[in-house]
Amino acid sequence: MLDPKKVKNAPFWWDEAPRPTGQPPELPKEADIAVIGSGFTGLSAALTAARAGRQVTVFEAEEPGHGASSRNGGGVGAAPFKLKYSEAEAKLGREGAVRLFKEGIASITHLEHLIESEQIRCHYKRSGRFTGIHRASAEAGLRKEVDLMQDRLDLDVQMVSRADQHEHIGSDYYLGGRFNARDGVVHPALLHQGLLERAEQAGVTVLAHTPVQSVKREGATLTLQTPRGAVKANKLVVGTNGYTSGAIPWLERRFIPVTSNIIATEELDPALVRRLVPKDNMIIDTKRTVHYYRASPDGKRILMGGRPAMREAHWSVSARMLHDFMGKVWPELKDVDISHAWGGSLGFTFDKLPHIGEHDGIHYAGGYLGSGVAMSNYLGHKMALQAMGDPAGETALDNRNFPTMPFYSGNPWFLTAVAAYYRFRDTYG
């Protein structure tokens, strides 16, 4: 059951990887490359630039990794776009769509190399992802996507019949689904901790509790104003995603902060958890109000995530909605206690794609749409290469038109209506 008085309102991941504490280092007067944001994007960029011999300073408004990088569900996806492959091909043509989706595959390859080469202990496993069909009308569309991804991308992705879905989920809730063997799971806070340690070992200065209040161009340099003073930088890269603030209004108008929530059950019988999630894979579904869930790395809990409200609400409200849904998927869990409940902001975009580019001398990457564990590390790395003028930084996402909406200034007032519409469509088609 969900008793708010007994639930820890903090990420389950932080039990094993607490957020760093302590006073930030002294504020430097200047930096070769300044980085705003200490999540996966920012730290990946910082590490790449530091290894290339640049003096790098990272600015963080809270403690390092306070945002989505240490709060997410830990799913690692090879197709990290809200655009379906068929939609991408209709919009970009076959060549453009293939190039785009191969960036998603490359992001996993990059992440796996990063984890192995940096020897980061983070429970990474290429266990796959099962997408459950929530209603019969969704099957044809999912099958079309599987056929296209097999043909165009040669991905190891297969349709799963309802009779065979127990290989991937111990539940009869879905009507079969899809299994993508290239996807995986990771402990996101341990991954972040490892990346932070490697960056600091490479000489990166990480300034916690040092928000950037404004950015001004002065000739060839940029001045970053903080409550602790000003810092001049030759280059600026931004990796704030769903936590982009008013310091850079142009970016704030293009990222849509969407609230996502997760609950973790109390410790369960490991045999029960293995029956519910036989392959230790990630599970999502075809709903517009998507849910994502998995077993904890130690195999003793179920972690259930979703975006039931899409805007920030009291954590207990979202937790109850997730707990109710978990009981529908697995009736044997409808009365289990919840130990942790938390939320965070994801970065969505109006065109359903991540973005990387440069505007007015400021390099940026973000808009991962809830699938950013691999892509954020990848685009952070690429962004640093681009800032240093290295041709190896080229991607299929470079400097694409980055749309916004009239009168939008970073406050997603429309999300409540969008969430209600999605719930209606999920129920009635």
Image (tube, rainbow, N blue to C red):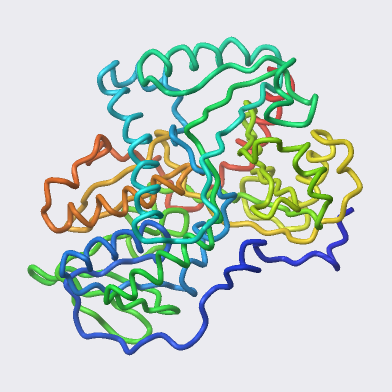
The quadrant holding residue 308 is: top right
Residue 231 in picture, x, y percent from top left: 24, 80
The quadrant of the picture occupied by the C terminus is top right
**Residue furthest out toward the left:** 219
Residue in the image at 61% along x and 49% along y: 260
Q: In the displayed structure, does residue 216 sit left or right of residue 214?
A: left
**322 relative to 158, above or below:** below
Residue 96 x %, y %: 26, 23
Q: Position of residue 97 (x, y in %)?
A: 32, 23
67 sits to left or right of 383: right
- Above/below status of 80 relative to 131: below
Q: Nearer the viewer, residue 279 or 29?
A: 279
Q: Nearer the viewer, residue 164 or 332?
A: 164
Where residue 334 sits, quadrant-wise, is: top right
**At 43% from the left edge and 78% from the top edge, which residue is drawn?**
208
- Horizontally, residue 14 falls left or right of residue 200, namely right
